[in-house]
Image (spheres, rainbow, N blue to C red):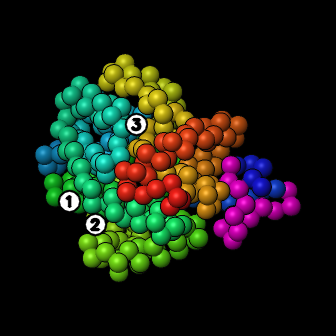
Amino acid sequence: MMCAKCVLPEYKPDICLNGQGICNICADFERAKNLKLNFLPILESELIKTLNKYRNKGKYNCLVMCSGGKDSTSSLYYMKKRYRINPLAFTFDHGFETEGAMENIRNAVNMLGVDWLYFKSDFMQELFAEIVRMKSKAPICSVCSIWYMQTSYDFAARFRIPLIISGWTRGQMVERTADSNLVLEPKFASITEATSDFIDKIRRKHPKYKNFPKTMKEVQKKYKIMVLSPHWFLQSESEEYVELIKKELKWKPIRLSYPANSTNCYLNFLSVHLSMKYYGFTHYHVEMSKMIRMGLLTRDKALKLLERNYDDKLLASILGKLGCKTEDL
């Protein structure tokens, strides 16, 4: 059963529906909506104030994580054109990026005239394969996000950049600590436990992963680097900035990506498939449910975007690249 207000299904003990079919997360949100929440302000003036702290400090004022999607590409555009600070565009590639996404990044950095750091590594491939072979309930995207954030922090620190800019939407809004470092919202307990358990096993099994972080907080506590997204502060709808980057940066949508109208890597399809198998929802369901609660997205539109748009043939090709078979699922 699915919540009558958002798009999260019942998955006990993390997600429970009450007698009216409303999940505990929506119910908690309703109870807390009149309280002062500890989220970043969404006023653009607050963003400008923060950016001004780092303006003209060092060769690069910020590192922009750029995947080639509409949100990260527009974030890069805003940093260079709207706020006129000097960004270093950063792209990590685990071997599953699409050519369409890469073309979008190349067009953006060339037309904006910004430096671009492209990092490609097969370091994670064996770890991804083990998630499949061990039939772990650790979401591939959750484990990958720990790696890519650690990599982003590492490069920002290497270039002495005190600020990382993401393309995260308001559905991915995070809290800020007193020292302005990054704190991700708590994950669902079942997913957190599955991820921690998998990383414990992979540390013991593969020496090269012996120091792999178990949580995002383990990564974050090593650095004094702020992470922000301009989309938390601007009131622009995605349709508006999509038209902007199409005109200014020759940005193009990706033909096939999940959810619809997104730009995600090929491995994302496998991650979504496994998350739906084990939990009945993905991190996109969590993000869109938050946006529904905030009045930023309708439930009907979210359901449409979350419809499965890939087939078993595509999954088989992704598994093959990992050295796995369909039977491993």
Residue 151: x and y in percent read: 27, 58
Residue 106 visible within the image: yes
Q: Number of marks in the image?
A: 3
Q: Secondary structure at mark 1?
A: helix
Q: At x 40% / y 51%, what residue is drawn? A: 320
Q: Residues within 10 Å of mark 1 (few under 14, many from 20)?
A: some
User: Identity of the amino acid at label 3?
Assistant: Gly
Q: Which residue ends up furthest to the bottom in the rendered image?
A: 204
* The label number, if any, that marks residue 157 in the structure image: 1
Return the mark for residue 268: none
Residue 12 magenta: yes
Mark 2 or 3: the one toward you: 3
User: Which residue sits furthest left?
Assistant: 59
Give the camera-side residue of 236 and 137.
137
Q: Which residue is mark 3?
A: 69
User: Residue 179, located in which quarter of the rendered image?
Assistant: bottom left
Residue 44 visible (yes or no): no
- The mark closer to the camera, 1 or 3, is 3
| Of callouts 2 and 3, the N-terminal one | 3
Looking at the image, which is closer to me, 215 or 98? 98
Q: Residues within 10 Å of mark 3 (few under 14, many from 20)?
A: many
The answer to whether residue 197 is above or below residue 111 is below
Dot 1 and dot 3 residues touching (CB under 8 Å): no
Q: Amino acid at mark 1?
A: Ala
In percent of width and height, residue 278 lies at 61, 62
